[in-house]
Amino acid sequence: MRAMLRWAHADLRTHRGEALFLVCATAGIVASLLLAAALLGYATNPWQRVFTQSHAAHVWLHTGRAADPARLAGLDGVASVAGPYDTVATTVASRGARASVELRAAGERPPATGRPLLTAGRWLDPAVPDGVVLESGLAAALVAGPGDTLALPGGTGRTVTVLGVADTAEPRYRPGERPGTVWAPAATVRTVPGLPGRLTGLRLTHADDTEYAVQRAVTALGAGAVTDVTHWQQARAEAQDDTRLLGRILGLFGLGALAAAALAVFGAISTRVRGHLRDISVLKAVGFTPGQVVRVFLAQHLAYAVLGAALATVLTHTLGGRIPGRVGDAVGVWQGLPGHPAALLGVPAAVVALIGAATGLAAWRAGRVPPVPAGAPAGPRTGRGLSRPARRALALPGVPPALVLGWHRAFGRGRHTPATVARLALPLLLITVALGAWTTIERFDTRPERLGLPAALTARPAEGVGDREARALLQRSPDVLAAHRGLQVAALVPGQTGTITLRGLGTRQDPYPYSVAEGRPADGPDEAVAGQGLLDLLGAGVGDWVRVTVGGRPQVLHLVGRSIEPENGGRTISTSLDTLRENDPDLRPTVYHLRLRPGADPQAVRAELLQAAAGRLDVHQVSGPADRLAALRGVVAGLIAVLALIGLTEVSTAIGGAVRAGERDLLALKAMGLSPREVTAVTVTAVGCTALAAAVAGTALGVPLAHWLIDHEGRTSGVGAGIAHGPSPLHLLAVVAAAVLGAVALAVVPAARAARRRLADTLGAYG
């Protein structure tokens, strides 16, 4: 045991830099995986916590006041019923901001099923007849809290007072897409002007029976009585949208970095075994058994892995919650979840186990090295001689011999160089994919019109403001290039099991600029384009006819294209406003999508329009995926740093192998008349050629892989394929140049040191 410890200590002193790289690479990998676990847990568990604590309903049915949902309690699979609650669709205003809301009648005590969880203030109080409770998302949009007052429509000056703010497991408020929930006394709901309705929640015995339960409920009430259906899967998906992509990308790159690190460790040990065959043979000759040789290599590198994993675990646990932005919030929530201790211990243990498996294979090869045979050299054979192309290149005038010999050493020395190139290419491939993700995010921010977001602002006219007046107000600003009229309604898909968004955008004379990834834009009667999420929901494709129901009226549309739809999970079908009017002539535009001139500041234009409209328009800035993915830029930068560190580890291994090969060839090179500087150039050229081959292979394979992965994520999330944008040629050139120049810079000092060794030292080491 003492001899094994002395050998490990001497090896550590000799290769301190390589040991530091292995520890830091392991720490970066473990930290990435732990942050991925935190984000994935943060994406699901907060909603699940609210759903469980509120005893939430699995299905919510919106009907007219004439419907009688009482019969739903007797349906098979229904455990309990929430409501029915009288509702009214209206708007509220606070400090100049206006929001669409659904006032829901509630009693003095929160309901048992679908109970809102108060986060601030208190519940409804009979002593405050005009008191209300706001859903937390709506409260954040209105910047309202307990004690604030909200103005009701109608010009009567009537207001309500906010008593509390509550969380709910239902879909959250989204401006222009989904109204916010306001719990109010029944007397207030009955007297507020607006669209009346009724809401009923069903809590099921088995959550997986949601679609079947919805079909039974719609059959019991009548298809025409149900105007909207929302279910728990939809609410959970919306709650996960902001952080699920972060968690997936962190998990993907964490696993890729783990594989790259395992290969780097395997390559480092394999190269060390080849470079220390004489030492290993001497160890076995003095009494070390094969098992002892295996154990000393395995224990040494497992110690590096354990140290790096422990360092990452401690830092993530103690400092992870202080990371700015959503990542820090995720770590803070994750630390309070039940599965946190298991993940905090399981992830580092899995990383150490995987690195140990890779180490064990290389260490097993070290154990097979035979003792030094009497009279035989312990060093390995130097490989094949110069190839015919190398000899011809050396004969050419003006060709530096160091360049030819370096190229030959890199690619003409047997089977080890391809393995080195493959190991170094893997982190470079992942870096290229990460740059592709970065470029796609930048494209969402700089070219939103190509990714389904041509409008920077949306404007909604106040009550009583007609189409002509609204367009006149919007066209006063020179920064507004176009104001496309639009209408958005909820529609039921065939089978009445889910609600999708039906939009009427633009007219045939003023078409809306769709971002069509497949097919063509909708420019004819009954033509429409749909998002990937809707196509998946209906099992339809471009060229099919689909039938949806709007307010009890069927609408048959011809899908002529697939559009990129970043919102609503892609469950959106869009046609022209003229097509919707053919089915219902009373429809009027309710929203205007504003395209601005290039370079215009949306916030400044919004402020200008609000001031000019004097309360007649409600203008909002369009929030796209770039806003939700802003935190991903920092994540990608961190992943690139981790992958670069793994690449440096592999480069240091490649340099060590090249230097040892150069020491074996030192006698021959000096006999050929090469100076120490030229011998150094041979080793540096060999390392540079290896890095160049790996960089070209990594970037060449990384670009199509980035396109496939990003488009696959877009397809599965409902946005649709066609959003991927690979790194620019300049970025790829920078990756290749950084890899080659970095490898060359790291190789200069050890190569020069080896080239200046005395011939007697070389003879003693290899002969």
Image (tube, rainbow, N blue to C red):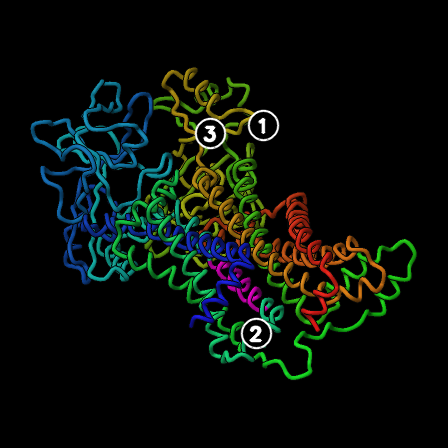
- Tell me where residue 598 appears, x and y as whole percent: 58, 27
Q: Which residue is mark 1?
A: 598
Q: Which residue is mark 3?
A: 457
Question: Separation of disc 2 and disc 3 at Cα?
Answer: 71 Å
Which label's residue is closer to the chain start, 2 or 1? 2
Tag 1, which secondary structure?
Answer: loop
Q: Which residue is mark 2?
A: 280
Q: Nearer the viewer, mark 3 or mark 1?
A: 1
Question: What kind of residue is marked 1?
Answer: Pro
| Predominant secondary structure, magenta span | helix
Q: Residue furthest left?
A: 127
Q: Residue furthest front?
A: 760
- Callout 2–callout 3 Cβ contact below 8 Å: no
Which label's residue is closer to the chain start, 3 or 1? 3
Snapshot quadrant of residue 75: bottom left
Determine crowd level at label 2: few under 14, some 14-19, many 20+ residues with C-alpha closer than 10 A: many
Q: Residue at x 32, y 38 (%)?
A: 173
The reply to whether the magenta stretch includes residue 21 is no
Question: Magenta residues, as a range?
Answer: 255-270
